[in-house]
Amino acid sequence: MEKTSETRLEKNLFEETFWEKAAKTRMGKYLTGMETSFVSDSINQVRPQMILDVGAGAGKFSLLAAEKNATVVSIDIDSYGLKRLRLQNKHAYIIQADARKIPLKDEVFDAVIMIEVLDYISEADEVFKECHRTLKLGGLLVFSFGNKSSFKQKLRALRGKSYTHSYGRIVRWLSAAGFAVTRKMGFNWGLFGRTSESRLVPLSTGVEKLLGLRRIPSLSPWVMLHAVKSDKSLGDNH
């Protein structure tokens, strides 16, 4: 009976999530490659034993972190992606939870990964406080967000769209939460959408690299930051 239930569950979870499908497009492969490279470099620097993947979805970065011989706990507000992750790794630790209220103890993790999550949460300051609380002193927070201060935002505004956070506000909230930024990268300067299959994607990403645009995160459309939990007292911010 139990095996029949498991088989039925797997059939119900056959459909890939939007994020899984998007990652297979020309633009998606570029974005995933940039994110994966940055996350891998960050993890390799600190070699964490315990990692929390916030907004894990189907587990793209949870699976990457698990390859580093770390114990990974994956949380997401949506259960479907987490079930997809469990299909790929039956031993995955998954929790359905909100990033603004993580149901885990203080100072448990050596690193927190949070990729493409803050664009859907206006209260990023609350998320940073939760990340700070669950991280050990000196722990790593590596995350990405769309930059409201970028030129690309002006083009998005013409279509009635907007990124949620500006680079300056994110950095201020990070500092207030008790984090120090030690590494940063900008990317996604091209005008293509996430699911684009345009043959010009490689050209635009090559120009981005050639002109050194990735070294200007404050103006970049997307930003990745590597921050470390400091011993700064949070005071009233905690």
Image (cartoon, rainbow, N blue to C red):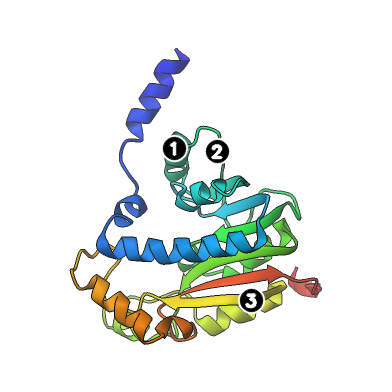
Name which residue type carries label 2: Ala
Mark 1, other Cα within 10 Å: few <14 / some 14–19 / many ≥20: few
* 88 sits left or right of 206 in the view: right
Name which residue type carries label 3: Thr
Res. 88 mark? 1
- CB atoms at circles 1 and 3 under 8 Å apart? no
Marks 2 and 3, how far apart at CA: 30 Å
* 8 sits left or right of 50 in the view: left
Res. 223 mark? none
Residue indicated by mark 2? 92
The residue positioned 43% from the left and 45% from the top of the image is 81
How far across and how far down the image is residue 173, in percent?
63, 77
* 34 sits left or right of 136 in the view: left
Counting residues from the start of the chain, the first of labels 2 and 3 encountered is 2
How far across and how far down the image is residue 131, in percent?
66, 61
Counting residues from the start of the chain, the first of labels 1 and 3 encountered is 1
**Helix or strand or loop: what does disc 3 sit on?**
strand
Regarding residue 31, the answer to whether it shows in the image is yes
With respect to residue 121, does 17 lie above or below?
above
User: Of residues 162 and 16, which is closer to you in this image?
Assistant: 16
User: Of residues 224 and 124, which is closer to you in this image?
Assistant: 224
Residue indicated by mark 3? 182
Marks 1 and 3, how far apart at CA: 33 Å
Instruction: Assign the C terminus to one quadrant of the image.
Output: bottom right
- CB atoms at circles 2 and 1 under 8 Å apart? yes
